[in-house]
Image (tube, grey):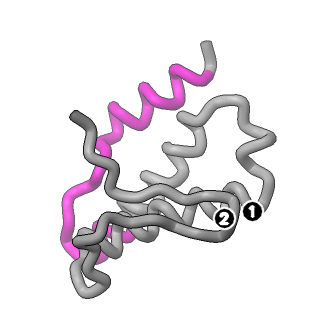
């Protein structure tokens, strides 16, 4: 079963699990990912992109860059990101 770590809505709310801890770098990493999605929505990027994979890739790339600064492994590897984008081009 998939456990949702975070999600946002158009009412300017980002929902995170109730065990979210802002001090923890893993949790801050998840918050960053959801903030990217909120900014995408606020800028209308979700209406321009016809594939959610492109939006996910952008969020994961930024999240992975942030994680690298803290010595953390990427959330998604290069191959997975490539496959997410490839799915959008079909």
Residue depicted at x 32% and y 56%: 5
Image quadrant containing the N terminus: top left
Residue depicted at x 38% and y 70%: 66
Q: Number of labelled discs? A: 2
The location of residue 25, given as percent across then percent down, is 25, 77
The location of residue 90, given as percent across then percent down, is 61, 12
On screen, residue 76 above or below 40: above
Regarding mark 1 in the picture, which secondary structure is present there?
helix
Give the side of residue 34 with respect to residue 74, left or right: right
The magenta stretch is 66-88
- Alpha carbon distance from label 2 to label 1: 5 Å
Q: Is residue 68 magenta?
A: yes
Instruction: Determine the main secondary structure of the stretch shown in magenta.
Output: helix
On screen, residue 46 above or below 8: above
Question: How busy is the neighbourhood of tag 2: few (under 14 within 10 Å), some, or many (20 plus)?
Answer: few
Regarding mark 2 in the picture, which secondary structure is present there?
helix
Determine which quarter of the picture holds residue 18.
bottom left
On screen, residue 5 above or below 17: above
Between 42 and 67, the one lying in front of the other is 42
Q: Which residue is mark 1?
A: 42
Residue depicted at x 44% and y 31%: 82
Q: Give yes or no for contact between labels 2 and 1 (Cβ–Cβ under 8 Å).
A: yes
Q: Which mark is residue 21?
A: none
Determine which quarter of the picture holds residue 77.
top left
Q: Is residue 24 magenta?
A: no
Determine which quarter of the picture holds residue 31.
bottom left
On screen, residue 41 above or below 30: above
Question: How busy is the neighbourhood of tag 1: few (under 14 within 10 Å), some, or many (20 plus)?
Answer: few
The location of residue 9, given as percent across then percent down, is 61, 58
Q: Which residue is mark 2?
A: 39
Direction top: furthest residue: 90
The location of residue 83, given as percent across then percent down, is 42, 26
């Amino acid at each position: 079963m998939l456990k949702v770590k975070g999600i946002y809505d158009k009412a300017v709310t980002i929902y995170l699990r109730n065990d979210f801890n802002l001090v923890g770098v893993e949790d801050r990493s998840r918050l960053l990912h959801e903030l990217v999605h909120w900014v995408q929505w606020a800028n209308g990027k979700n209406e321009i992109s016809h594939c959610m994979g492109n939006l996910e890739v952008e969020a994961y790339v930024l999240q992975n860059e942030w994680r690298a600064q803290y010595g953390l492994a990427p959330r998604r590897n290069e191959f997975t990101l490539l496959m997410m984008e490839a799915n959008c081009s079909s």
